[in-house]
């Protein structure tokens, strides 16, 4: 058992205005990302990874680009991303919090 | 890719005052549970499952019982649960939203 409290979590700046904290087990990882760099006028460059992903929108609004038409997502929505499928986001609100979950874990996030 | 929008999701009543919706890939499942039956005066009965779990607290306050001392959690906190470890919760606020993530998927939730 590991507890990661928001108030005490070590947060990693992954870009200007983007902070990440996370927890993981052997095969499951949850990554919380707080974006304060929205809204964006265009999407981030697309990326992909072999890991399966599900994203939960904890706060805010965004476009999620995957498999063609962008999906407009807001608080409470879920989207799944199969392995190796290119995807990206475009923030529509000032602040967005995403909860990204992965299997297997993103080893590169632990370095 | 699957999108599950909060506003349109099919929600399953798992108990009085507890509604669940979910999304999954092959090996990853995210289950959102909205509790409106808090606060509780005592915890739910403990349970366990072989699946690894990470819980993200999207709203509210609760006690998470695992490995001895209860952990007080609130919005933004994460807790990990290894497979086969007994655990349970006690809601401390009227409303709580938990985002439970699992590997492998909880097949029994799809029936």
Image (spheres, coloured by chain):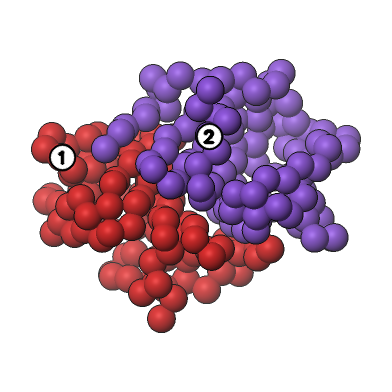
Chain colours: A red, B purple
Tag in front: 1 or 2: 2
> Which is more toward the observer, A3 or A28?
A28
x then y, percent, for residue B33: 58, 33
Residue name at image x 76 percent, y 49 percent: B87
Mark 1 surroundings within 10 Å by alpha-carbon count, few (fewer than 14), some (14 through 19), many (20 or more): few
* Residue A28 or residue B21, whichever sits in front: A28
Which structural element holds mark 2?
helix
Q: Secondary structure at mark 1?
A: loop
Residue at mark 1 to residue at mark 2: CA–CA distance: 26 Å
Instruction: Point out residue B29 in the picture as x, y percentages from the top left corner.
Output: 47, 42
Q: Compared to B24, does B18 lie above or below?
A: above
**On what subunit does the disc labeled 2 rest?**
B
Residue B90: % across, % down:
79, 41
The label on residue A110 is none
Q: Which residue is mark 2?
A: B107
Residue A45 seen in this snapshot: yes
Side (left or right) of A20 relative to B90? left
Identity of the residue furthest to the bottom in this view: A111
Q: Which residue is mark 1?
A: A67
Chain of the residue displaying label 1: A
Q: Are marks 1 and 2 in contact (CB under 8 Å)?
A: no
Residue drawn at x 35%, y 50% is A53
Local crowd size for mark 2, using a 10 Å CA cut-off: few (<14), some (14–19), many (≥20): few
> Dividing the picture into quarters, in which one does residue B60 lie?
top right
């Amino acid at each position: 058992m590991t507890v990661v409290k928001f108030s005490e979590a070590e947060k990693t700046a992954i870009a200007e205005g983007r902070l990440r904290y996370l927890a993981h087990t052997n095969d499951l990882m949850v990554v919380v990302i707080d974006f304060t760099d929205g809204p964006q006028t265009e999407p981030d460059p697309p990326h992909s990874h072999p890991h399966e992903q599900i994203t939960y929108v904890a706060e805010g609004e965004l476009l999620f680009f995957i498999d063609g038409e962008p999906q407009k997502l807001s608080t409470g929505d879920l989207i799944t991303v199969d392995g190796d499928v290119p995807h990206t986001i475009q923030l529509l609100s000032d602040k967005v919090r995403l909860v990204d979950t992965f299997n297997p874990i993103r080893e590169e996030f632990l370095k």
